[in-house]
Amino acid sequence: MTSRRPLALLFDLDDTLWPISPVIAAAEVSWHAWLAAHAPRVAQAFSIAELRVRRMALLERRPELVADLYQLRREALAEIFAEAGEDPVHIEGSMQHFAVQRNRVTPFDDVLPVLPLLQGMLRLGVITNGNADLEVIGMDHHFEYQLSSSTFGRAKPDPDIFRTACEAMGVAPQDAVYVGDDLRLDVQGAQGAGLRAVWMNRHGSTAHLDAGVTPDAICATFDELLAWIRGQMQH
């Protein structure tokens, strides 16, 4: 482990800045209702759960789609529309509706007070496998750089997505810290690319012990993250 003073702090989004499961659950309910109104044959033939099963089946056949979950949803829907004999003109409208709902996130209580403090100390960026739109959410002003797997073409934990973000920000990987909630995608992915990695572990999990993963730090809150970063800045 290195003790170099960091220059950049990069973040995962879903389940790091906000909880995502309740957002996706609500978005899928709203999405299915939209389909019922505009593509009733699809909604009648497929429940929310059945649509999800079809997406997962497509992902097994086309694993590269993990890098763009919107495209996965769109292509699965195209198959289903064809099967149901529904007009494909509504596929794009349904995707736009889902995107609006998917961005109705609520940050964890400790995130918005701490981000400006971190922003005053380090350059901030984002690397995400998800499809959150920070501009729509109203948080893009905190980050000077964003890279999504759908833009990059490959998803975390691919080391190149981390290295590409560092290169774009003009910092060496060893001078960057990545913060995320997923041990494999975020911690192992970032460390494999030469960054330090902070595991956001809000629930006191000990999964890292079973997984044999050693984060550079484990934080339960953004206040703990701020304290750890301040310590790193002393080097």
Image (spheres, rainbow, N blue to C red):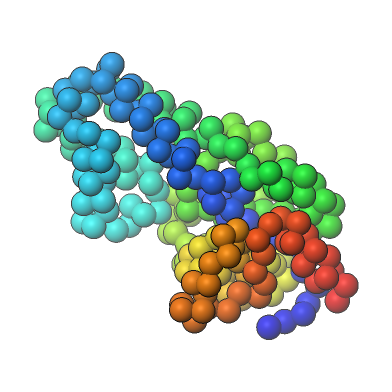
Residue 232 visible in this rendered orientation of the protein: yes
In the rendered image, which quarter is residue 203 located in?
bottom right
The mark total stands at 0
Look at the image and tell me whether residue 196 can be seen: no
Q: Quadrant of the N terminus?
A: bottom right
Q: Is residue 171 left or right of residue 154?
A: right
Q: Nearer the viewer, residue 75 or 233?
A: 233
The picture places residue 202, in percent across and down from the top left corner, at: 60, 58
* Outermost residue toward the top in this view: 37
Residue 158, percent from left and from top? 46, 67
Above or below for 38 versus 80? above
Residue at x 21%, y 40% (from the top left corner) = 50
Left/right placement of residue 129 relative to residue 56 reads: right
Q: Quadrant of the C terminus?
A: bottom right
Q: Is residue 116 above or below residue 40?
A: below
Q: What's the residue at 76%, 56% (across, down)? A: 223
Q: Residue at x 71, y 55 (%)?
A: 222
Residue 175 quadrant: bottom right
Side (left or right) of 95 relative to 112: left
Find residue 36 and report its horizontal and vertical position in percent. 26, 20
Q: Residue furthest front?
A: 204
Q: In the image, residue 42 lies at what x, y percent? A: 19, 27
The single residue placed furthest to the right in the displayed view is 234
Q: Is residue 13 above or below residue 3?
A: above
Q: Which residue is nearer to you in this view: 44 or 188?
A: 44
At horizontal 68% and vertical 57% (from top left) the residue drawn is: 221
